[in-house]
Image (spheres, rainbow, N blue to C red):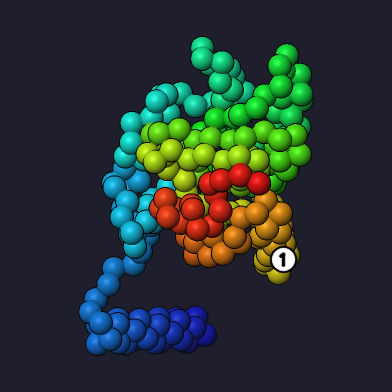
């Protein structure tokens, strides 16, 4: 008899839950039409052209590429930052930015036989902390940065780029920002994770101001999910101070 009563209670609770769900659906229809749940980014693919007011694109570094044709095979980019010198004598810094890359690349730059004056960057991004550390080093030693026509600099890469004393972005280059993760531990309580994120964003804004960049560019980063990228238009790159010299 007791198990029968428990069963009736559970059945009644299920009916109530289904009723509430039905009311929510009806209210959704009444307010603005039926909408399916959103299971992923709603932005167009990164391969689609970008126009003013339509600048958010899906972002999957292993799949999505900008509409331009890169001068180098973007699929061949290394997983970690790699410093190379091309046949024309120009130095390139390409690949994903990982923790520990700043110290490693700094040592390689210091060890170059002739001083490196300019670095050509191409990267899908990665570690924000490593980008800030290496960007400060570039500014300290007086190295310029460039992004070539058809190449890209996303996520944490723009923070590395603005460390350059002189900064050039080709008309056909693609530069984009979005939200970042500053902590990797999934075991942190929610309040600690929020504090970590807020501290990280604060560090980025302080860094941008140090580099002479308008921190208002962060409004685009903070409002763009990590699975999307906000492509900065040439006039925005100019307005926020990405191009020019310090």
Q: Position of residue 175 (x, y in %)?
A: 47, 45
Q: Nearer the viewer, residue 142 or 182?
A: 142
Q: Nearer the viewer, residue 129 or 39?
A: 129
Q: Nearer the viewer, residue 218 or 47?
A: 218
Left or right, 96 with respect to 69, comes to right
Residue drawn at x 38%, y 34% is: 150
Residue drawn at x 52%, y 39% is: 168
Left or right, 91 with respect to 9, comes to right
Residue drawn at x 24%, y 76% is: 34
Q: Position of residue 162 (x, y in %)?
A: 61, 45
Q: Quadrant of residue 97?
A: top right
Mark yes or no: residue 20 visible.
yes
Vertical side of 61 occupied by 90: above or below: above
Q: Position of residue 109 (x, y in %)?
A: 71, 24
Q: Identify the residue position indicated by label 1 in the image.
A: 195
Q: Secondary structure at mark 1?
A: helix
Mark yes or no: residue 127 visible.
no
């Amino acid at each position: 008899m007791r198990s029968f009563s428990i069963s009736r209670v559970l059945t009644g609770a299920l009916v109530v839950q289904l009723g509430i769900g039905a009311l929510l659906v009806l209210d959704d229809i009444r307010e603005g039409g039926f909408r399916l749940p959103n299971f992923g980014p709603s932005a167009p693919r990164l391969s689609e052209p970008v126009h003013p007011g339509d600048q958010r694109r899906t972002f999957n570094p292993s799949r999505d590429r900008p509409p331009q044709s890169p001068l180098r095979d973007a699929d061949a980019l290394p997983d970690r930052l790699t410093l190379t010198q091309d046949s024309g004598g120009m130095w390139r810094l390409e690949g994903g930015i990982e923790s520990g890359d700043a110290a490693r690349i700094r040592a390689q730059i210091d060890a170059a036989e002739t001083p490196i004056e300019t670095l050509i960057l191409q990267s899908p991004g990665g570690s924000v902390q490593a980008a800030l550390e290496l960007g400060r080093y570039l500014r300290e030693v007086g190295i310029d940065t460039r992004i070539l026509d058809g190449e890209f600099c996303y996520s944490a890469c723009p923070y590395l780029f603005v460390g350059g004393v002189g900064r050039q972005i080709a008309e056909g280059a693609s530069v984009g920002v979005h939200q970042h993760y500053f902590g990797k531990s999934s075991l942190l309580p929610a309040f600690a994770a929020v504090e970590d994120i807020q501290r990280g964003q604060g560090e980025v804004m302080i860094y941008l101001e140090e580099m002479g960049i308008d921190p208002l560019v962060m409004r685009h980063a903070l409002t763009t999910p990590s699975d999307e990228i906000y492509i900065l238009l040439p006039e925005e790159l100019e307005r926020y101070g990405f191009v020019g010299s310090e």
